[in-house]
Image (spheres, rainbow, N blue to C red):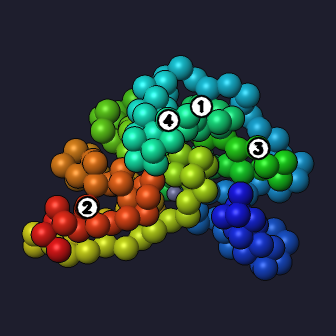
Amino acid sequence: MKAFMLLLLGCLAFSGSSCGLRVHRDLILKDQGFSRLFSSTDPSFASQISSFELTAAAKTGDPTFRIGDIPINFGDPENEQFQGVCFVYSSGEKEIIIRKSWWDGASGLARESLIFHELGHCALNRDHHNETVEALSRFFKTSMMNSVIVGPADYLQFKDEYHEELFTLSTTSLLGSLGL
Ligand SMILES: [Zn+2]
């Protein structure tokens, strides 16, 4: 809630509809007058949601962790650069919209990486974190909250480390695994 309020305040610092946060992010604050498109979740996303809740429980130590009232459905993310988006409405309600054409062609790892990223916005109130580090002769994202989602190969290799950062903000495990 605090992060949401901060974003809202940041948003209001810009004048009216030219708010800078709305255009370039997949965490989008909707103006008054817009309401949620869905009230329940498409069963297509059940396994990713279950995985997110189980991982959250393990990483936070809270066995009751649930994402709460955040419907996830296929639809138009409203920006061609995005395959998924977290919408936050003026009522405080949230929802996640996923582009079906991307989903249908994506691997299981890529799908999970995207859903975890969008839930990072919608359920964990996280913003983007675009830090990268150089290791093993290339660059690695240090967070699943990078504006470009973590690719399937890196996600497979460092899944536990990325989950650690997502839920605890600690990059210690990842940096250790990268030899840094
Ligand atoms: Zn994002």
Q: Position of residue 85 (x, y in %)?
A: 58, 48
Q: Quadrant of residue 26?
A: bottom right
Residue 63: image tag? 4
Tell which tag, 4 or 2, sits nearer the viewer. Answer: 4
* Amino acid type assigned to the residue bearing label 2 in the image: Ser
The local secondary structure at tag 4 comes to: loop
Identify the mark nearer the N-term, 4 or 2.
4
* Amino acid type assigned to the residue bearing label 3 in the image: Glu
Decide: few, some or many residues near mark 1? Use Cα within 10 Å; few <14, some 14-19, many ≥20.
many
Q: Which residue is mark 1?
A: 73
90 vs 158, nearest the viewer: 158
Identify the mark nearer the N-term, 4 or 1.
4
Q: Is residue 125 left or right of residue 82?
A: right
Tell which tag, 3 or 1, sits nearer the viewer. Answer: 3
As measured in the structure, the alpha-carbon distance from the residue carrying label 4 to the one carrying label 2 is 22 Å
Tell which tag, 2 or 3, sits nearer the viewer. Answer: 2
The local secondary structure at tag 2 comes to: helix
Identify the mark nearer the N-term, 3 or 4.
4
151 vs 58, nearest the viewer: 58
Name the residue: 72% across, 30% down: 38
Residue 93: image tag? 3
The local secondary structure at tag 1 comes to: strand
As measured in the structure, the alpha-carbon distance from the residue carrying label 1 to the one carrying label 2 is 33 Å
Question: Considering the image in quadrants, where does the C terminus appear?
Answer: bottom left
Name the residue: 65% across, 36% down: 68
As measured in the structure, the alpha-carbon distance from the residue carrying label 3 to the one carrying label 4 is 24 Å
Q: Which residue is mark 2?
A: 173
Can residue 85 be seen?
A: no
Can residue 169 be seen?
A: yes
* Amino acid type assigned to the residue bearing label 4 in the image: Pro
